[in-house]
Amino acid sequence: MKQLALALTCLATPALAEGDAVHGTLNPDEMTWQSMTERAARGETGMVICAQGYMLTKSGNHAAARALFLNCANAGYTGAMTWMSQLANNGLGGAYNPDAAAEWDRRAAELGDPVGQFNYGLDLLRGHGVAQDDGLGRRYVDRAAEAGLPVARRLQGAGYDPDEVTPDADNWKYAPLF
């Protein structure tokens, strides 16, 4: 009897593994980068989808990361806004665009994100992607420091000198254009 039950189970298993028109795909491909990019292309967002953008950009797939982060940033995820800034500021997955980078930083800062506040403060201190405004830049850095961001405190301690927190390899990027 056990052998008959086992044989029937084995025969039925392939049929159970397939989807049907009524119930859809029974074991969907949920947690792959491909499924996340497909979901992003449909306009879906969520914590798990947004977090996959980090993995994609770290793997070098900046265009896919940008697509995920764009949806998430537009849905109000401030962490995705700071990643959009990073991608735009470094020309990853799209053109180098300091104006877009500063705008993403500003949006995150205005929503209270300490990293966005710090980055926007630096943008203002440098005049990178936005008109230079030393006083406003310091205020944004101060907000980030008050929120406990260590790098903001470090910048305060260095008299707001951006060289304290920026690799000298990036100096070309922040040089005046005139």
Image: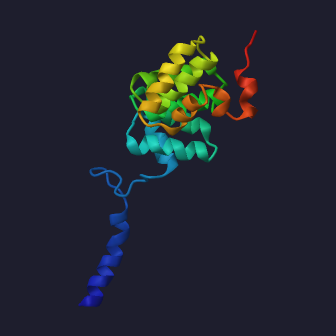
Residue 71 seen in the current view: no
Check the image and tell me how it is coloured.
rainbow
Residue at position x 65%, y 33% in the image: 164
Residue 177 left/right relative to 84: right
Residue 12 left/right relative to 53: left
Q: Picture coordinates of residue 39 (x, y %)?
A: 43, 40
Asked if residue 140 is positioned above or below residue 167 in the image, the reply reads: above
Q: Picture coordinates of residue 40 (x, y %)?
A: 45, 37
Residue at position x 64%, y 26% in the image: 161
Residue at position x 35%, y 66% in the image: 15
Foreground residue, 146 or 1? 146
Q: Picture coordinates of residue 119 (x, y %)?
A: 54, 27
Asked if residue 98 is positioned above or below residue 19 in the image, the reply reads: above
Q: Picture coordinates of residue 137 (x, y %)?
A: 53, 19
Residue 102 seen in the current view: yes
Foreground residue, 30 or 70? 70
Foreground residue, 176 or 150? 150
